Image (cartoon, grey):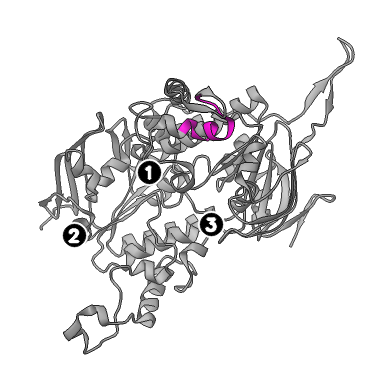
Amino acid sequence: MGNNPLLRLEHIGKEYYGNRVLSDISFDINAGEIIGLVGENGAGKSTLLNILFGMPVIASTGGYEGSIQIDGRKVSFTSPNQALAHGIGMVHQEFSLIPGFTAAENILLNREVLNASSMRYIFSERVSTLDREAMNGRARSAIHTLGVNISPDMIVSEMPVGYKQFIEIAREIDRKNTRLLFLDEPTAVLAESEAEILITALKKLAASGIAIVFISHRLSEVKELCGRILVLRDGRLITDQPSYTLSTRQIASLMVGRESVRREETPEVTETVSTETDAPKKKKKIRPALKVEHLWVDMPGETVRDVSFEVMKGEIFGIGGLAGHGKLAIPNGIMGLYPAGGTVKTFGKKLTLNKPRAALGKKMAFVSEDRRGVGLLLDEPLDWNITFTAMQTQGRFLVGIPYIFQMRNDLAMRKEARKFIDQLSIKCTGPSQKAGELSGGNQQKVCLAKAFVLRPDILLICEPTRGIDIGAKTLVLDTLKQYNKENGTTIIITSSELEELRSVCNRIAIVDEGKIAGILPASNPAEDFGMLMMGQVRNEEEGEFSA
């Protein structure tokens, strides 16, 4: 093997669904090295990883150009099993866990430890039983390597989303021959404290000789963790250089090919009135668009105990907090996706809980954090995805006689889809492309388009920029602000990114252990929100924190 790098790519290229998505990509990675791979959505990152991991979609669409070498020997994977056999592990952006299995069962899936039995020599391994103790021990060791405390017996369906991410990574660590690990947005669903734990663990793995390719849109993490940074733009490798030579602003500029735009301060939600032309204007309080009282939600891993708050008409309201403390359960419970109780009113009228259609009937729209499981019809075209809910609940995009005979208006559906494809810069071949063929960030934009088509009075959004690159993130957040400004839509954003909330919201509520720890103006110092996340409750009268 000599001085050959662990992995070498030479002139990799790929055409996919009629689009050129990769062109002439070449780079090396050595054992124990961590490189950061960054780029906008549609830059080609996921396609490159699919090639390296032998995903079937590559072979089924004509293969790829160029060559891949491991230890100086040319390889060409047509299935993930071939990549795994060569010591390559992959943690995808979307989870691939079995919900009803325990952490240990998922970590050791297809590598289970069996109790010895003489009958297996006669009837094969199928008569053997699982050695639960040994499996839990191995799982516990892999989890411990990551520096987190998760029981091997915990059922995946009952885990908060951050725990699921750690289980995905632990599964790859448990493979004894792992030499190269690809991580696609591993911190996107993690709180800042959890992300710090993961970064520390990844540094230890690299010190043991495992090479890591780290994809993230959190550029500060890329700078902290990675020795080299590779920037992809429009399917081409723009730069490959040591991370210390680049600032986060330079990386962002290389990614988007333009200077990122600084967002303006979000104005206070008030309206002005005057009785005379020259009289000074005075502020008038705006009525609540959403009033929540003593809400409880039974969502696995995100239980809400007793939550009360108000959101004013036309306000952009943020909900933040650490993973697993209940922030995601609030919008999911309000929209009827999980069992909930308490009182919710929209513009003074009581909302019937536990019935999603009732929320939609109140002119509410929802963008789920689970875009693939809840938000999209992956095998259907974009025009169908964008307009389907409006067709079902509002009777739009139909022609014919109501209640007698109606059929969908394909022309109107395509026209509406094209409008949002242009407005949100969705990278696709057109309205007829299937949603499942888009990158994760572009799928998220389709979910936003689907919500905008409903023309809601109240829009609830969970993790709006999860897995979205810095340029697309700015576009999405600016689009939300513009939509709010032009339509007066009340927007509630739930996010793991505190700075994202502070950049776009008027006020932010922090959820801690299923309750609201405090609600502060977004202009407050970041340290105030950090105190709330750490379990310090704010005394509104004195303006101070207490345990």
3 or 1: mark nearer the eye: 3
Q: Amino acid at mark 2?
A: His
The location of residue 467, given as percent across then percent down, is 44, 43
* 396 in the magenta segment: yes
The location of residue 163, given as percent across then percent down, is 48, 61
Check disc 2 and report the residue beneath it.
Answer: 86
SS for dot 1: helix
Q: CA distance from mark 1 to mark 2?
A: 31 Å
Residue most toward the bottom? 118
Return the residue nearer the eye: 303 or 219.
303
Q: CA distance from mark 3 to mark 1?
A: 23 Å
- Residue 46 placement: quadrant: top left
SS for dot 2: loop
Query: How many numbered marks, from 0 up?
Result: 3
Check disc 1 and report the residue beneath it.
Answer: 244
Residue drawn at the location 48% of the way across and 42% of the way down: 375
Magenta-tinted stretch:
386-398
Residue 531: tell me if it is visible: no
If you read the primary sequence from the N terminus, does the residue marked by circle 3 or circle 1 appear first?
3
Residue 444: tell me if it is visible: yes
Q: Amino acid at mark 1?
A: Tyr
